[in-house]
Amino acid sequence: MSFNVGQQTIKTARVRSLFVAALVLACAFGTVTLAAAQVTPPTTPTDIAVPAGNFAFLVGHAFGSQGYTCLPTSTGGTAWNLTARPEATLFTDLFGAQFQIITHFQSINENPKPSIVPPLSGNATWQSSLDSSRVWAVKVKGIDAGSDPASCPNSGSIQCLLLQSVGNKKGPTGGNLLFKTTFIQRLNTNGGAVPATACTVGQTQLVPYTADYYFFRASKE
């Protein structure tokens, strides 16, 4: 009898856990939907401004790292070189807690836009943690950190960027959170800059950084 009661308790706990997980996901989708009308990026310099006809629908606060490798220089010395794209996890605030919404990494562009020839080394990628939709993007322009107090105030950090989509793909079950993304802004960067230390050839280093990523879609006609 006690065994049956114990099994029932375990089943009930599992059902509750699944219900809570489903509720969190539903709330997350709801938060993203509501955020579409509420996301207001800071004003940026013209160099990294998103073209007219697009609106911000989502923002994620990123925690990640930028990779560097020590290579020989033409003068016989060594120097740190940017050899890998940033990798990061993006979060949004959900009921006062940080909830993961996107992962940022490098991957092969599986659905390039017309006339785009994707590099074999891959493109910067953002994948939704909610529905696995993806956007691949490339840098259009950047500004040095510390050059704009409103959008890129932290001197000595990696650049703030304007990136443009070169490919989009729905999730395996048709999810399209990032499928219509046209542009991405990386703003409020903090950290991630090239190391200031001496190095030996072949040495690698991951430098932590944070940033705000704003995602844009084309405005409705």
Image (cartoon, rainbow, N blue to C red):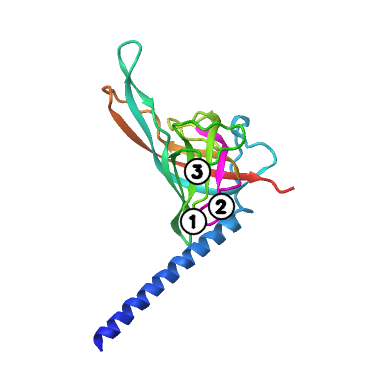
Find out whether the residues at labels 1 and 2 contact each other: C-beta distance under 8 Å.
yes
Q: Earlier in the sequence, mark 1 or mark 2?
A: 1
Secondary-structure class at tag 1 = loop
Which residue is situated farthest in the top direction here? 75
State the residue in front, 67 or 5.
5
Q: For the residue marked with disc 1, what is the amino acid?
A: Leu
Q: Which residues are magenta?
A: 160-180
Q: Which mark is residue 130?
A: 1
Q: Is residue 164 magenta?
A: yes
- Badge 2: residue crowd in 10 Å (few <14, some 14–19, many ≥20): many
Residue at image x 42%, y 69%?
A: 18
Measure the C-alpha gap from mark 1 to mark 2: 8 Å
Residue 107 point in image, percent of width and height = 45, 39
Q: Nearer the viewer, mark 3 or mark 2?
A: 2
Q: Which mark is residue 177?
A: 2
Quadrant of the rendered image containing residue 181: top right
Find out whether the residues at labels 3 and 2 contact each other: C-beta distance under 8 Å.
no
State the residue in front, 206 or 173.
173
Q: Nearer the viewer, mark 3 or mark 1?
A: 1
Residue at image x 58%, y 48%?
A: 179
Quadrant of the rendered image containing residue 46: top right
Secondary-structure class at tag 2 = loop
